[in-house]
Image: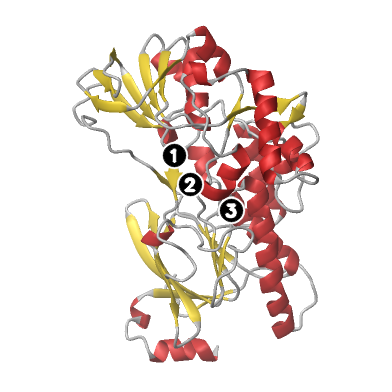
Amino acid sequence: MENLFRLVDNDQDFFSRRCIWVNGPVIIGAGPSGLATAACLREQGVPFMVLERADCIASLWQRRTYDRLKLHLPKQFCQLPNLPFPQDFPEYPSKKQFIDYLESYARKFEINPRFNECVQSSRYDETSGLWRVKTVATCGSNRTEFEYICRWLVVATGENAECVMPEIDGLGEFKGDILHAADYKSGENFKGKKVLVVGCGNSGMELSLDLCNYNASPSMVCRSSVHVLPREIFGVSTFELAGLIMQWLPLWLVDKLLLIFAWFVLGNIEKYGLKRPSQGPLQLKNTKGKTPVLDIGTLEKIRSGDIKVVPGIKRLNTNSVELVNGENHYVDAVVLATGYRSNVPSWLQEGEFFSKNGFPKSPFPNGWKGNSGLYAVGFTRRGLSGASSDAMKIAQDIGEVWKKETKQKKQRTTACHRRCISQF
């Protein structure tokens, strides 16, 4: 509390805002990473506050994913700490099932985020030794500014906070529909249409397959190299098999074996325009964060010609696309499966822990803790299992300090928030 008084003394604008003292960490983001951290803190007996800019938990899953989406990995590798998936869930839960799981997770651990609060800035105040998080809360047409004061700040906005919009010549001239994969739900509205899918990652592959299943004619742009692996090898999850082999063999050899297995199951994919990178799939994932594609049926449609693979785009015209190889194709719509990026640099005023690309500078497994009470969860490029691992480390680290200073035994605790200025 002494630090809080010091903060008031040195800030002339302090009383012009609705200010809330949080007796515990502030977690920014109510996706799986934020929920996992909150649940682990709850188990440690540490109170917390979760801020979320959307009106629901896991907004990426609820608002910006396509209907046919399923978890790419078996459910045992995707469950959050301290709560397994229901036994009656299939090995690869659907989008709806995963959302139901997350909502039950929030209820079980009594996680109640403050929704519709968009963080404008966060900075560490050297004078007080506290974090200052400024937000704008929206309710209909009403906007209210808040400032949260806390000792610990957990960044849980993740790797996929904002859509990546590519620069394509002629994009503004194209007269057909243009949408990002975040706005794509199903191929039902594209029946009988020629659709250009820009991107050949997991999203681009699955959207192309979905479009094909709705009798559209997709062409998938594959500008760079890509690793395509079967989702399962000999009835075992490729991810699980790789993890088992890595216990005895070095990474480079595991990569070699995975590619041999992939060739055995999928055949030579390069003759269809899918060129493999020079680095192995696991090495590429570790060094550049590029996830290999797990095939769930797209390659079969590519072999049959129902999905065309085309090279890079030179430019878009009114109703066609000109490719770098000189070919021109008529298209009715363009779907941009060009991925997402972190938005941390836009609001976190800090330059030591996070780099300009919005990821921690220290690679896994050391990218979860910064200085002055700053933490990051969900930036490992290792999916939900990586986020869960970070969440447990963060909660344990904060919990040790909390218990030492408050001399409390491990028990469930309700978050304690005191208003510095009460204007509610």
Q: Quadrant of residue 192?
A: top left
Q: Helix, strand or loop at disc 1?
A: loop
Which residue appears at 50% of the width and 34% of the height? 65
4 and 348: which is toward the camera: 348
Q: Please, what is the three-letter code of the amino acid marked with disc 1?
A: Gly
- At horizontal 59% and vertical 38% (from top left) the residue drawn is 280
What residue does disc 1 label?
A: 339
| 3 in relation to 205, above or below | below
* Residue 393 image offset from top left, x and y in percent: 69, 64
Coordinates of residue 414 in the picture (x, y in percent): 67, 68
Residue 400 appearing in the image: yes
Alpha-carbon distance for marks 3 and 1? 16 Å
- Residue type at tag 2: Asn
Q: Quadrant of the C terminus?
A: bottom left
Q: Who's the residue at 70% across and 56% down the image?
A: 109
Q: Is residue 424 above or below residue 246?
A: below
Q: Which color scheme is applied?
A: secondary structure
Q: Mark 1 and mark 2 in contact (Cβ < 8 Å)? A: yes
